[in-house]
Image (cartoon, grey):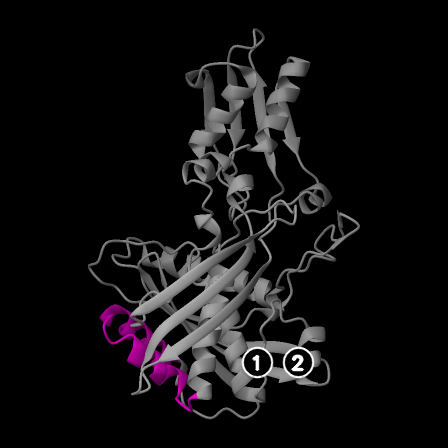
Amino acid sequence: MEPLNAIASVSPSGDAVEIWAGTQSQSIACEAPAKVLGIARDKVKLHDMLMGGGFGRRGNRDVEFIIDAVLLSKETGRPVKVMWTREDDVHNGRFRPISAHYLKAGFDPSGKLTAWHHRIAVDRVGPYMDPVRYQQSGGKDFIAMLGGEPRGYDVPHQLVEQLYRDTGVRTNPLRGISFTANKFAAETFIDEIAVKRGVDPLKFRLELLQKTPRAVAVVERVAEMANWGKAREGRGLGIAFIDYSGSQVAGIAEVSVDRASGQIKVHNFWCAIDCGVAVQPDNVVAQTESSIVYGLGMSLIERITVKDGVVEQSNFYDYRVPRMNEVPPMHVEVIATDNHPTGVGQMATPLIAPAISSAVMQLTGVRLRHTPFTPERVKAALG
């Protein structure tokens, strides 16, 4: 929620700089100003401040919001505080890449899922976010492909392909990184397979996860929390599971749909997470709730449009984020284990879109495949 900002004070001789900024990469926040000023890195003193939100935007290698303050301080010979306006922040954002997905599944004679093909067409992220690591990888854009494989599921033959698109849009990781888009496609497809084969989506996942006991535990627990299988008049349930960097996360959304307006309402969201040793369980719950809210925004309303090369949104009046009255009760349970800690910062965000899509499918028989699920898109799908 915090616009980009930084304070810099370049020494009168120009051979040192002191910086106050919130950053997701302290090393880069020192390295980039040193390069711009032509000074040694140890001549950069960084005061790492708390951030009012980062989510990928404060980790770019060029950290331009810091460089703005550094160059202005050098030019004026005094400390300078730079704070972007909300409008500048939105207009000059670095956006999550557009992607399109093609998935195909193969089965053996007994009906077991044995082959998985996921082809992803996506804008490059690495050249904008971190060109150094992108070049070191030989031009492979791993950061756009995370979550493309059905990790945790017992599928012996897997092929995940990347087709680059170069639209010229300046892209960036966004909370959940590429898991958010890639798992939306993958988990929705898992649900489609189950529905097409006449198998309960929960049961289908549990069968595929039998070799991953920790995954089974979170899926079974979230099903118990949500009372999966209980009929709810006018409402549908959808489930999603993710192995995110070793953290096992499962979620269930309870939704209703106003067919006249196309408006989706999420009434409850249940989530179970096994992130290994939970050092601070209360913080795990808080981070997971935050991830859910973020996922709700990206799934239902948050959208950037570009016309004639210009971003059309300016502020929160036309780039909407979830309001308090739009956030459902969130029921989060941490399953404590003695496994190595594997992270919680954004693990639940990619659950939301596939869970909502599958809940709408259960309720209406219509599959939503394009996020965000705006009322216009929902009405068109239902129509």
Q: Which residues are magenta?
A: 197-225
For the point 66% across and 21% down, the residue is: 72
In the image, what residue type sits under mark 2?
Ala
Q: Secondary structure at mark 2?
A: helix
**Image x and y of residue 301, in percent:** 65, 65
Magenta-drawn stretch contains 375: no
39 versus 319 height, above or below: above
Tell me, yes or no, if residue 13 can be seen here: yes
Residue 219: in magenta span: yes
Relative placement, left or right, of 92 versus 367 is right
Residue 116 quadrant: bottom left
Q: Is residue 96 above or below residue 354?
A: above
- Residue 136 lies left or right of residue 339; in this view the side is right
Q: Which mark is residue 367?
A: 1
| In the image, farthest residue toward the right | 308
Q: Residue flagged by tag 1: what amino acid is it?
A: Arg
Q: In the drawing, what numbered circle is on residue 290? A: none
Q: Which residue is nearer to you in this view: 383 or 53?
A: 383
Reading the image, the residue beneath label 2 is: 381
Query: Is 159 on the left-hand or right-hand side of 12?
Result: left
Residue 269 is at least partly visible in this image:
no
Q: Residue at x 71, y 41 (%)?
A: 88
